[in-house]
Amino acid sequence: MLYEIHGAIHPAARKLMDGVWRNGTYAEYARFPLENLYPLDEEALLGRLGYIITDLCLLTAYLVPFGGLVEVDVKPGEVVTVAPATGRFGGGAGGTALAIGATITGDEVTDTQSFQTAVGQPEGANVYLDLSPPTIKDLSLLVAGIRALGSFGRCVLMGGHLGNIQLRSTYFSTGHPLREESIQLNQSIDVVDAAVTAAGAAADAPARPAQTSQQLPGV
């Protein structure tokens, strides 16, 4: 979607942008690398579902935030906060998260109480997707979004902050080791608890009389 408006940086890429892909979709016949093309079910989309071509052009507004939401593995029922959610990709993020099955809420900065009511779980949101444009100079949205996250919350930075981002926190993990170890620990506790419960149930069951070799079948 950037073929016709992005001149590329590397000389080899600029050669392609200025040559084969120069006019992008503004050309009468657009050219695209085959590895970037994916077939769509035309009969289902334009027939059974009733979409038109211009509807399908909106896919670009959903694919960008979709990549971020998939990266943090958003699951149905989770709470996703998007800010700002008024632009092309921010608006698309709301629709994308809803399609995945998440619950959407607005800007936590304006009203903490309404935020807690909207998410239905005062302990915080599961995911914060930041799409702040370069025109936003302060970090109020980003800070509010991160502070609105609950335990094991995930943050996706897809905005255009041009400067340094400074946040105060006790711990930060650039990967997943802390989160995964804690989750595995909780899972281990659940397994042990289930085993103890099963053992307790077995202990409470009436004892069966011991069988002698004469009573065992086939002996």
Image (cartoon, helix red, strand yellow):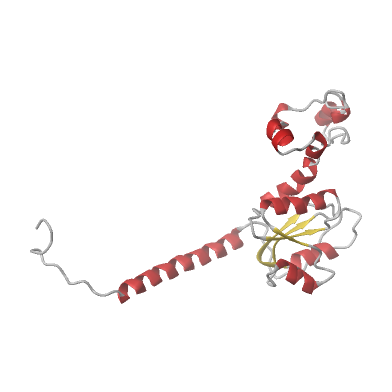
Q: Quadrant of the C terminus?
A: bottom left
Query: Is 88 situated above or below 143?
Result: above
**Displayed quadrant of residue 141:** bottom right
Is there any visible trace of residue 38 in the rendered image? no
Residue 194 at x, y percent in the picture = 43, 68
**Displayed quadrant of residue 165:** bottom right
The residue at the point 85 percent across, 29 percent down is 24
Residue 88 at x, y percent in the picture = 84, 48
User: Quick one: 26 or 177, which is closer to the camera?
Assistant: 26
**Displayed quadrant of residue 172:** bottom right
Residue 98 at x, y percent in the picture = 71, 54
Looking at the image, residue 109 sits to the left or right of residue 49; the answer is right
Looking at the image, residue 156 sits to the left or right of residue 194; the answer is right
Number of numbered discs overlaid on the protein picture: 0
The residue at the point 85 percent across, 30 percent down is 25
User: Quick one: 31 or 157, which is closer to the camera?
Assistant: 31
The residue at the point 48 percent across, 68 percent down is 189
